[in-house]
Image (tube, helix red, strand yellow):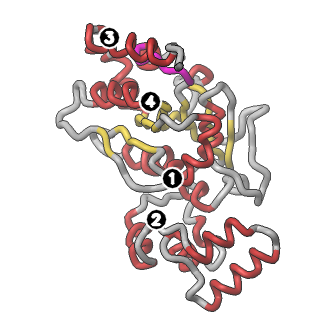
Amino acid sequence: MNSKVADAIGLNSKPVVVVWADSAPEGAMRFKPGRWGCVVSMFAAAAKGRVGAFNRQTYGCWGGGVGLGFGNCYESFPGGVKGFCRFLADGNDSCEDGRRIGEQMVGSGDRRFADDFLQGERYLKDADTTRSFLATMPICDLPANYVVVKPLGLADPAREDIKSVTFFVDPEQFSALVVLANYTEPDLENVAVPWAAACQIMGIFAYRELEREHPRALIGLTDLSARLNVRASLGTNVLSFTTPWPLFLKMEQNVEGSFLQRRTWDELRRHRYEFQHSSVP
């Protein structure tokens, strides 16, 4: 399937779909069972033409398992949910069990994770705030064996259970998508910025939007850890824009006759192209 939206905004990568499936496509990239991996890196690979697949043994990391819809994987985080709540906040160093687990990590050579585990990522103020965050997260256990990510052009809407489409965009492309997402919708807040891991925005938060009468688009890659993990593949001037499948289809229908075919957008595209191809002294 070709995307009118992607063509109109001059997308340099491929739109990425999330599909629920009973089996993994032949040749799909997979994480090894029990081995760490960043789910967003698979999205980045799909934006370049690859296909990736995840199941309940190959989701890469605890947050990724949650984000894809494989239940509350934080229960198997070192130190359990309590350990994760401290990890996301001010760390496990003040807890005897936490210090013991962190020392074992250091002994096994995983010093970077051990440092974050003990001192905390500090993305939330304290463990109580993290618990409140988890209580509002749309954690679910999806009724499918696999989550597949792949380029939209390789998807078959007639046969596949497509949940969402994610674009990786620069600020001007992002702005155009915000306008288009609001083009025919009944209010002016049809794009939201939830705070969560990047893969969770593209996964369970997008799944939740499908339950709304008017699903919203979601802005992502405000996750600092994910940005660090994919900066080499996606660059530093990019955000993700995830559209639930019904909204994506509306946006596709609305390209014709919209601002995307008018002078202001044409001028922005031209200036963007000239800037990207200008020589820097």
Q: Is residue 48 left or right of residue 204?
A: right
The spot of residue 180 in percent (x, y) is: 30, 25
Within-10-Å neighbours for mark 3: few <14, some 14–19, many 20+: few
* Dot 4 or dot 2, earlier in sequence: 2
At label 2, which amino acid type do we have? Tyr
* Dot 3 or dot 2, earlier in sequence: 2
At label 3, which amino acid type do we have? Glu
* Dot 1 or dot 3, earlier in sequence: 1
Residue 170: give its label.
4
Could you tell me how far apart the alpha carbons at marks 3 and 2 are, in whole angstroms? 39 Å
Within-10-Å neighbours for mark 2: few <14, some 14–19, many 20+: some
* Dot 4 or dot 1, earlier in sequence: 4
Relative height, residue 204 to residue 186 (above, below):
below
The answer to whether residue 142 is seen in the rendering is: no
* Dot 1 or dot 2, earlier in sequence: 2
SS category of the residue bearing label 4: loop
At label 4, which amino acid type do we have? Asp
45 or 214: nearer the eye?
A: 45
Residue drawn at (46%, 16%) of the image: 10
Could you tell me how far apart the alpha carbons at marks 3 and 4 are, in whole angstroms? 16 Å
Relative height, residue 77 to residue 255 (above, below):
below
102 or 33: nearer the eye?
A: 102
Residue drawn at (55%, 72%) of the image: 120
Could you tell me how far apart the alpha carbons at marks 4 and 1 are, in whole angstroms? 17 Å
Residue 123: give its label.
2
The spot of residue 83 in percent (x, y) is: 58, 78
Give the residue pinned by disc 1.
224
The residue segment tinted magenta is 8-13
The answer to whether residue 113 is seen in the rendering is: yes
Give the residue pinned by disc 3.
267
Q: Is residue 117 left or right of residue 157?
A: right
